[in-house]
Image: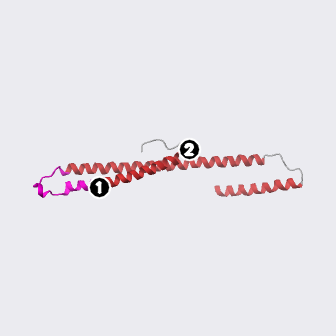
Amino acid sequence: MLSEDFGKHLMGVEDLLQKHSLLEADINVVGDRVKNVNGQADKFVEGDFPDAGGYKPCDPQVVRDRMAHLDAAYEELQQLAKDRRSKLDESRKLWQFYWDMADEDSWIKEKEQLMSSPDLGHDLTSVNLLLSKHKVWHLAFIDCLYCLS
């Protein structure tokens, strides 16, 4: 929970998120056990033991303190899990952004290479072919601009 490892790449973050989901499931199981233990402890706080002649096996305040400590520790564990989930989600967003930026950068370099080509065509057919490629590129560029805005 206190690990500062939030992934060094997108796949690493996805792996950490999957492991964290398993850990959250384990925490939920522990939560059920905490409720069960506190339910059993209530018997010692609230209960009368008439067969024992008023004898109480333990001071009720000690049991209440232990129950409160157990609840506080569980709540702290839940908060740590929530904070880590939030940081991992932010890390995933960051690495997804880097992934998308690299993809866009390679697209731009590819189109830059096409646009800087000195080939202007040798005849009418090759000029028309280059014009149609340019129109397709132009439409893709406009779509890209539209997606970014």
Q: In the image, is residue 43 above or below residue 114?
A: below
User: Residue drawn 53% across and 45% down?
Assistant: 12
User: Residue drawn 19% across and 52% down?
Assistant: 60
- Residue placed under numbered mark 2 in the picture: 9
Real-space Cα distance between discs 2 and 1? 41 Å
Q: Where residue 35 appears, x then y in whole percent? A: 30, 55
- Residue placed under numbered mark 1 in the picture: 36
User: Looking at the image, is mark 2 or mark 1 earlier in the sequence?
Assistant: 2
Q: Is residue 128 magenta?
A: no
Question: In what quadrant of the picture does the C terminus appear?
Answer: bottom right
Q: Is residue 14 left or right of residue 47?
A: right
**Mark 2 surroundings within 10 Å by alpha-carbon count, few (fewer than 14), some (14 through 19), many (20 or more):** some
Label 1 secondary element:
helix
**Between 119 and 14, the one nearer to me in the picture:** 14
Q: Which residues are magenta?
A: 34-60
Q: Is residue 141 left or right of residue 94?
A: right
Q: Is residue 39 magenta?
A: yes
**Between 137 and 45, the one nearer to me in the picture:** 45
Task: Check residue 129 in the rendering and tell me which mark sits there, or answer none.
Answer: none
**Colour scheme:** secondary structure
Q: Where residue 20 appears, x then y in whole percent? A: 45, 49
**Between 49 and 115, the one nearer to me in the picture:** 49
| Type of the residue with mark 1 | Asn
Q: Where residue 100 appears, x then y in whole percent? A: 62, 49
Marks 2 & 1, CB-CB < 8 Å contact = no
Q: Where residue 54 appears, x then y in whole percent? A: 11, 55
| Type of the residue with mark 2 | His
Main secondary structure along the magenta-highlighted residues? helix
User: Residue drawn 56% across and 44% down?
Assistant: 9
**Mark 1 surroundings within 10 Å by alpha-carbon count, few (fewer than 14), some (14 through 19), many (20 or more):** few
Question: In what quadrant of the picture does the N terminus appear?
Answer: top left
